[in-house]
Image (spheres, helix red, strand yellow):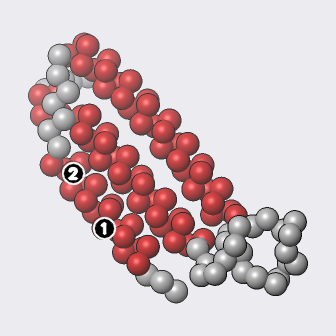
Amino acid sequence: MDVLPFLAAGWVLLIALYGMVTSRNLIHTIGCLVVAQSSTYLMLLGIGYRRGGTAPVYGDLVPGSRPVVDPVVQALTLTDIVVAATVTALLLALTIQLRKRHGTVDPQVLTALRG
């Protein structure tokens, strides 16, 4: 089992978390969240990868003759991409509204807002 995709996913996640923690702008924080979500793509594709595997289309090959990649992991990755795009759009829309109402996207300034 190859550990390189998992190390790459962990590295990308750590870089994104560092960016989120040190960010002074909500737009930058959302961008870092998108990068953190992309580390899950690497992890999922690393789980489903098989060396020498082909696409899971069984019309032209006999089942069991060659290894195929896991189609469930591919479907989960596509679902993850759609969810990430939706969450990003929602967070950006909320950030636009926050900027319109309070004039800033700096989280340090917005901490003064209370209930």
Q: Give left or right: position of 25 versus 87.
A: left
As displayed, is residue 75 above or below residue 28?
below
- Tell me if residue 111 can be seen: no
Position of residue 10 measured from the top left corner of the image (x, y, whole percent): 35, 68
Local crowd size for mark 1, using a 10 Å CA cut-off: few (<14), some (14–19), many (≥20): some
At x 61%, y 78%, the residue is: 50
Q: Is residue 19 left or right of residue 38?
A: left
Q: How many marks?
A: 2
Disc marking residue 19 = 2
For image coordinates 38% across by 24% down, the residue present is 93
Q: CA distance from mark 2 to mark 1?
A: 12 Å
Q: Are marks 2 and 1 in contact (CB under 8 Å)?
A: no
Of residues 57 and 108, the one nearer the viewer is: 57
Q: Nearer the viewer, residue 31 or 102?
A: 31
Secondary structure beneath dot 2 equals helix
Q: Which residue is mark 1?
A: 11
In this orientation, which residue lies closer to the viewer: 98 or 6? 6
Q: Quadrant of the C terminus?
A: top left
The residue depicted at 43 percent of the width and 81 percent of the height is 3
**In the image, is 56 to the left or to the right of 97?**
right
Identity, as a three-letter code, of the amino acid under mark 1: Trp
Local secondary structure at mark 1: helix
Amino acid type assigned to the residue bearing label 2 in the image: Gly
Question: Around disc 2, counting alpha carbons within 10 Å, would you say few (fewer than 14), some (14 to 19), or many (20 or more)?
Answer: some
